[in-house]
Image (spheres, grey):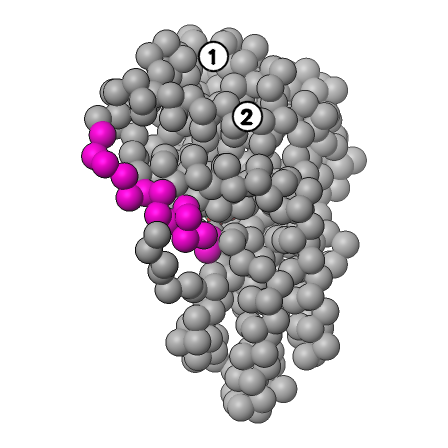
């Protein structure tokens, strides 16, 4: 097996992968219409349903795209032509859902909250009540990666159901990184991608869909490549992606899902959470403040307010860390500047300790602290 230089990615995905996932992509060329590849495809699909604990009532539609494609597929495939979607927006990805709807002429009611602030469920309920007759869906981001806030999954999903509405959850950066059970949490549609907490390579998005709901979408004609029902039916019938799949990315995803089960869901969630705890504690000790109140942290990414020191420059800090194998991520929310540290992917507590040492070394060298 080829070993590859290890970079510690603290950006929120594509995340660091294991060498075994990287090497899984080196396979003999294969036509994706071959049965062998079809079986691989179905095994990945079925295992993603298991990760979401959706074996009872859900299926999974695999698409060739980044995560945004999965969100676009879902919004454009399931909202009836004469209905509206209520979009909860407390960050860039909520805003992106609104932009997708605008691009397709899908009417939406916006529950806009300043980025980084939590959802007020009573306010949301009032808004649903006010628009109930026009609405068919409530859509929101589970972990709003722009700021690291966790929106309440089960509460919002069941609130939608209380008013006979379906829900759409963008769980891009939380799926496989924290406890999600689509049955228990009442999720109808959950969207995620191959390169975040599931620890695969970029190139596949997927929608875990309640089959009963999905089957009601056949008459909605708004898209082509991204039509969920068409993609579902083709895969189900032919054991093949509807269009050319990213062959090697699927092999990597197969390996990544196997490694998820080998590690164990609980162990993965605990590993991520423990890295967050260590990082949060040290960053606080160094005098930094967070954008989001701690009780709303998803524990998968932390947005940290830029230090006030005139010696601080994100780009310089990034380059210093990058040269030493650590990648950090900028983050601007309105007029507030932050930098973001994520703790997802095939990284471990020792990597976080090593990062914190170099981070502190830089801050002292530049007299930022
Ligand atoms: C919550 C959320 N939604 C959507 C996306 C968009 O995914 P992509 O950049 O793969 O299109 C991201 C990416 O980080 C995300 O975190």
Mark 2 and mark 1 lie on one chain; the one further toward the N terminus is 2
- The x and y percentages for residue 75 are 47, 27
Name the residue located 38 percent from the left edge and 26 percent from the top edge. Answer: 40
Q: For residue 127: magenta?
A: no
- Asked whether, in this view, residue 297 is left or right of residue 212, the answer is right
Q: For residue 23: magenta?
A: yes
Secondary structure of the residue carrying tag 1 is helix
Name the residue located 42 percent from the left edge and 48 percent from the top edge. Answer: 20
- Asked whether, in this view, residue 359 is left or right of residue 68, the answer is right
Name the residue located 37 percent from the left edge and 9 percent from the top edge. Answer: 237
Q: Which residue is mark 1?
A: 217
- The x and y percentages for residue 250 are 36, 35
Secondary structure of the residue carrying tag 2 is helix
Name the residue located 50 percent from the left edge and 23 percent from the top edge. Answer: 46
**Magenta stretch, main secondary structure class:** loop
Q: Is residue 263 visible?
A: yes
In the rendered structure, find residue 88 and report the number of the disc placed on it.
none
Q: Count neighbours of disc 2 (C-alpha within 10 A) and say few if under 14, some if 14 to 19, many if 20 or more.
A: many
In the rendered structure, find residue 49 and report the number of the disc placed on it.
2
In this orientation, which residue lies closer to the viewer: 18 or 119?
18
């Amino acid at each position: 097996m080829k070993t590859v230089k290890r970079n510690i990615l603290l950006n929120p995905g594509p995340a660091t992968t294991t060498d075994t996932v990287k090497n899984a992509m080196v396979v003999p060329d294969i036509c994706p219409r071959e049965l062998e590849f079809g079986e691989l495809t179905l095994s990945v699909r079925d295992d993603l349903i298991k990760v979401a604990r959706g074996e009872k009532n859900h299926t999974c539609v695999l698409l060739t795209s980044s995560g945004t494609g999965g969100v676009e597929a879902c919004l454009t495939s399931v909202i009836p032509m004469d209905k509206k979607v209520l979009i909860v927006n407390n960050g860039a990805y909520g805003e992106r859902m609104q932009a997708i709807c605008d691009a397709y002429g899908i009417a939406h009611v916006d529950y806009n909250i300043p980025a980084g602030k939590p959802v007020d469920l009573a306010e949301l309920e009032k808004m649903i009540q006010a628009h109930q007759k026009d609405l068919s869906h409530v859509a929101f981001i589970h972990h709003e990666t722009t700021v690291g806030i966790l929106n309440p999954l089960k509460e919002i999903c069941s609130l939608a159901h209380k008013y006979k509405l379906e829900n759409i959850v963008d769980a891009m950066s939380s799926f496989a990184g924290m406890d999600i059970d689509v049955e228990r949490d009442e999720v109808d549609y959950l969207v995620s991608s191959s390169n975040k907490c599931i620890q695969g390579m970029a190139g596949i998005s997927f929608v875990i869909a309640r089959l009963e709901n999905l089957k009601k979408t056949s008459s909605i004609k708004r898209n082509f490549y991204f039509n969920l029902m068409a993609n579902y039916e083709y895969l189900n019938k032919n054991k093949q992606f509807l269009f050319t799949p990213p062959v090697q990315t699927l092999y990597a995803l197969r390996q990544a899902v196997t490694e998820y089960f080998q590690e164990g869901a609980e162990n993965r969630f605990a590993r991520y959470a423990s890295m967050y705890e260590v990082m949060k504690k040290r960053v606080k000790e160094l005098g930094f403040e967070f954008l989001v109140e701690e009780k709303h942290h998803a524990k998968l990414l932390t947005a940290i307010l830029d230090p006030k020191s005139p010696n601080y420059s994100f780009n310089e800090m990034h380059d210093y860390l990058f040269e030493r194998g650590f990648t950090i991520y900028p983050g601007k929310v309105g007029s507030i500047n932050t930098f973001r540290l994520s703790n997802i992917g095939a990284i471990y507590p020792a990597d976080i300790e090593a990062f914190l040492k170099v981070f502190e070394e830089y801050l002292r060298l530049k007299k930022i602290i």
